[in-house]
Amino acid sequence: MRAAASLGLASAQDVFRLRRGAQRAAAALGLEHQDQVRLATALSELGRDRVDCGAVTVAFRSESGEQPALVVTLEWDRGPEPTPETLQLVSRLVVIEYEPHGAHGRVTIRQPLPVNHSTVTEMDARLAKALGQPDPTTEADFLRAQTRDLIATLEETRAQREELRRLNKELEDTNQGVLALYSELTKELEATNIGVLALHSELDEKSQQLREASEAKTRFWTNISHELRAPINSVVALARLLLDPGSEPVSPEQRQQITLIEASGQTVLSLVSDLLDVVKAESGLLDVQRAPVDLRLLVTQLSATFEGTYGGRDVLLLTPDLWDLPTVITDEKLLTHVLRNLMSNACKFTDEGEVRLDIGLGEDQSSPSLRVTITDTGVGIPAEELSRVFEEFYQIRGPHQSGHAGTGLGLPYARTLTELLGGTLELTSTLGVGTRVEVLVPVHGPDNGGEETGGGTQ
């Protein structure tokens, strides 16, 4: 077996030399002081136990690899086995491997080394140099050296104990800080939870107040609409009675005034009706009755209505070919309200040019829908106002719309009814150029597979 250096044991003096040599060898290979003392103590105990066992040799060598090691082998050729007490003491200091062979025997110690990337040759050279140094010649010198080692070890142990005490103190302080932080975070979390609960409670209360306010608004508008309808109908009816050819003759000035009274009454009556319908739609009280709709008849009625109302101006009303219109299943009354409101807006705000009504099928074949497009060449809507035109009672102000009276309910009402029918309403406009409104309504109603259905929508 290769060995960098060997020592023989024949006397107590040799045991002293083995201890000192082992400590120097361990230091030469980079072991810490405590590991040096452990190795030296273990070898001296084994040497003292084996010194009278014939030819005893101690060989030192190094090993390289992922985990370099110092390997020390102690062999003897006769004598009893090492005592259990010695083996137990040595095994507490280092890792040993004992191989008994009758009177012969071998103990191998393998001490791991720090990784230093040195070759075996370099480490063996350091071992040979360390073991070749002279040792104290007397037992007293050796004992003094051993005492110095013991004192150094005790000082190192005390320093480590002080360092451990300091680290424990730091750990205690850290733990106290962590506990304090945890306590503070717990209190903050509890306070946050209390705040969240209070906020939820406040939100629930506000939601309840909003629901109650919405219900109160609905009841108010419903009641006021019903209360206004009767006297307004009376005013309109009396005005028509006064204008009837069979009534008492009136002067031209009186006839003009009565005509204004009737027109104003009709305006108020239309506002009240729209308002009542909007309230019903918002509260889910409008019934959606789906049935096949004859679009040809619907377009004919719309054309006649708006030709009679807005005819005679420099505006051309264009409608689609009556033979190309598809058949749809939806609520005819609600669809008529939607188109009448949109056509009324288009005609009201168009002084010249055209108002075009186009009807066809949507492009999405997987979800058949009716597409109605109303395009006008009217005053248009400013870009900054587009986001507000669907607010109830909101009317655009500006010189470009002077003379065009309205209630601010037409577009919101049309969108609400379109959504009740399961469709969508989109509006685009350019100031001074015109407006385009597109309505998409399911051909067979929303999710009814084409069957005719009826009933309320909540």
Image (cartoon, helix red, strand yellow):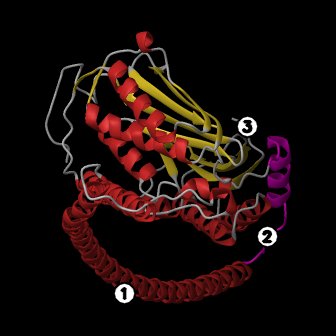
* Residue 128 in view here: yes
Where residue 197 appears, x then y in whole percent?
A: 28, 78
- Drawn side of residue 360 relative to residue 313, left or right: left
Q: Earlier in the sequence, mark 3 or mark 2?
A: 3
| Amino acid carrying mark 3 in the image | Arg
Where residue 315 appears, x then y in whole percent?
A: 61, 35
Q: Could you tell me which quadrant the N terminus lies in?
A: top right
Q: Read off the magenta span.
A: 117-138
Which residue occupies 43% across, 89% down?
A: 180
Which residue occupies 33% across, 35% down?
A: 335
Mark 1 sits on what residue? 187
Q: Which mark is residue 287?
A: none
Q: Secondary structure at mark 2?
A: loop
Instruction: Reply above or below: 10 against 5.
Output: below
Q: Earlier in the sequence, mark 2 or mark 1?
A: 2
Q: Which mark is residue 135?
A: 2
Instruction: Reply above or below: 449 against 144.
Output: above
Q: Are marks 1 and 3 in contact (CB under 8 Å)?
A: no
Return the residue found at the far left. 455
In the rendered structure, does residue 127 fall within the stretch colored magenta?
Answer: yes
The residues bearing labels 2 and 1 have C-alpha atoms spaced at a distance of 69 Å
Q: Are marks 2 and 1 in contact (CB under 8 Å)?
A: no
The residues bearing labels 3 and 2 have C-alpha atoms spaced at a distance of 25 Å
Where, by quadrant of the figure, is residue 250 drawn? bottom left
Q: Nearer the viewer, residue 381 or 138?
A: 381
| Amino acid carrying mark 1 in the image | Lys
Mark 3 sits on what residue? 2
| Amino acid carrying mark 2 in the image | Asp
Q: Secondary structure at mark 1?
A: helix
Which residue occupies 40% across, 60% down?
A: 255
Mark 2 or mark 1, whichever is nearer to me: 1
